[in-house]
Image (cartoon, rainbow, N blue to C red):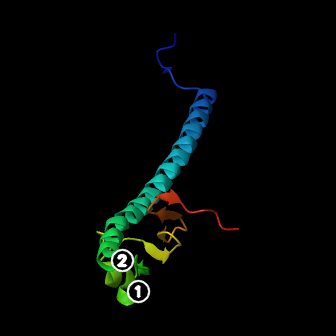
Amino acid sequence: MNPSRQPAFSILELMLVLAVSSILATIAVVLYQDYVQTARLGVLDAAILSIEPFQEAHNLQSGEYAQGSWHFEGPEDESLFTAIGWHPNDKNADLIVQVSLTEDGFQVRASNSFNDAICREFPSRRACPATP
């Protein structure tokens, strides 16, 4: 063995490491995006579920459910707060909520600026039927 020659990686070994690293990075990015999407939908669902006790209290006092909306951009649309006293814990939340009445309860639709949306019917808590 020549003492002046140092052991080194070949170009083939470097290319193989880069290829494997690229594949792993691609998988990680896709999984992270799914995680972020799931987290955003979880925030919407939590906001929807937090409206139920306010609506039930309003129903006990007045004999009917209330309708209204709440928008994260400011006080110009806080009719849901006026009607039942509800607003999200984080007033700056990226959240738009619309409550409408149905035959036997109410329906809550929540969305955000990423075009994620969830809808639930109450008191059953089922997902809203798909609209054609």
The residue lying toward the viewer, choosing from 57 and 71, is 57
Q: Secondary structure at mark 2?
A: loop
Residue at image location 46% in from the left, 75% down from the top = 99
Residue 87 location (% of width, % of height): 32, 74
Task: Tell me the distance, in whole angstroms, between the alpha carbons under discs 2 and 1.
Answer: 24 Å
Q: Taking 12 as reference, is 82 above or below it? A: below
Can you say which quadrant of the picture contains the C terminus?
Answer: bottom right
Give the amino acid at mark 2: Gly
Residue 104 location (% of width, % of height): 50, 69
The residue lying toward the viewer, choosing from 64 and 40, is 64
Residue 15 location (% of width, % of height): 62, 33
Indicate which disc residue 77 carries: 1
Residue 106 location (% of width, % of height): 47, 71
The residue lying toward the viewer, choosing from 85 and 61, is 61
Give the amino acid at mark 1: Asp
Question: Residue 77, located in which quarter of the rendered image?
Answer: bottom left
The residue lying toward the viewer, choosing from 100 and 81, is 100
Judge the density around disc 2: few (<14), some (14-19), many (≥20) Cα neighbours within 10 Å: few
Indicate which disc residue 63 carries: 2
